[in-house]
Image (cartoon, rainbow, N blue to C red):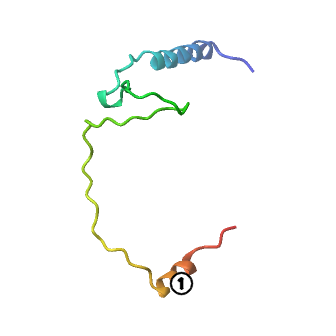
C-alpha cells in the first residue's frame, strides 16, 4: 500500500490543526457561586467537608397541589397486562 504525497502532507496537517484547536482556549474564571470558600469548621470526618452558604439565594419552586390517589384494581391489572415480560 503506497501513501501518496498528498496524504503525507494532509494527515500531519490535520493532526496539527486538531491539536491547535484543542489547546488554544484560555481558561475562564468559575462563577462566584461555584468557588470554594473557607469555612470556620474543622473537618473531623476524614472526607470532604460540604458547607452551605446561608447567604446564598435559593430558587423558587412551585409544587403542584394535585392530591395523591391510589390506582384502582382495573388500572393496576391493565398496566400489568401492557408490560412485556423481561427476558
The answer to which of 81 and 3 lies nearer the viewer is 81
Residue name at image x 48 percent, y 29 percent: 43
In the picture, the quarter occupied by the C terminus is: bottom right
The answer to which of 4 and 75 lies nearer the viewer is 75
Q: Which secondary structure, mark 1?
A: helix
Residue that label 1 marks: 77
Q: Residue furthest right?
A: 1
Q: Where in the figure is residue 49, as x and y percent of width and height?
A: 46, 32
Residue name at image x 56 percent, y 79 percent: 80
Residue name at image x 61 percent, y 17 percent: 7
* Image height of 73 relative to 87, above or below: below
Q: Where in the figure is residue 82, as x and y percent of width and height?
A: 55, 77
* Left or right of 54 in this view: 49: right
In the picture, the quarter occupied by the N terminus is: top right
Q: Quadrant of residue 8?
A: top right
* Left or right of 65 in this view: 45: right
The answer to which of 66 and 37 lies nearer the viewer is 37
Residue name at image x 40 percent, y 18 percent: 25
* Image height of 69 relative to 56, above or below: below
The answer to which of 28 and 9 lies nearer the viewer is 28
Q: Residue furthest bottom?
A: 74
Q: Quadrant of residue 24?
A: top left
Q: Where in the figure is residue 16, as x and y percent of width and height?
A: 53, 14
Amino acid at each position: 500500500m503506497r501513501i501518496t504525497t498528498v496524504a503525507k502532507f494532509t494527515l500531519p496537517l490535520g493532526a496539527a490543526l486538531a491539536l491547535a484547536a484543542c489547546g488554544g482556549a484560555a481558561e475562564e474564571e468559575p462563577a462566584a457561586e461555584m468557588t470554594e470558600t473557607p469555612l470556620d469548621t474543622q473537618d473531623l470526618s476524614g472526607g470532604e467537608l460540604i458547607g452551605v452558604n446561608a447567604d446564598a439565594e435559593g430558587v423558587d419552586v412551585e409544587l403542584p397541589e394535585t392530591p395523591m390517589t391510589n390506582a384502582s384494581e382495573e388500572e393496576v391489572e391493565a398496566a400489568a397486562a401492557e408490560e412485556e415480560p423481561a427476558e
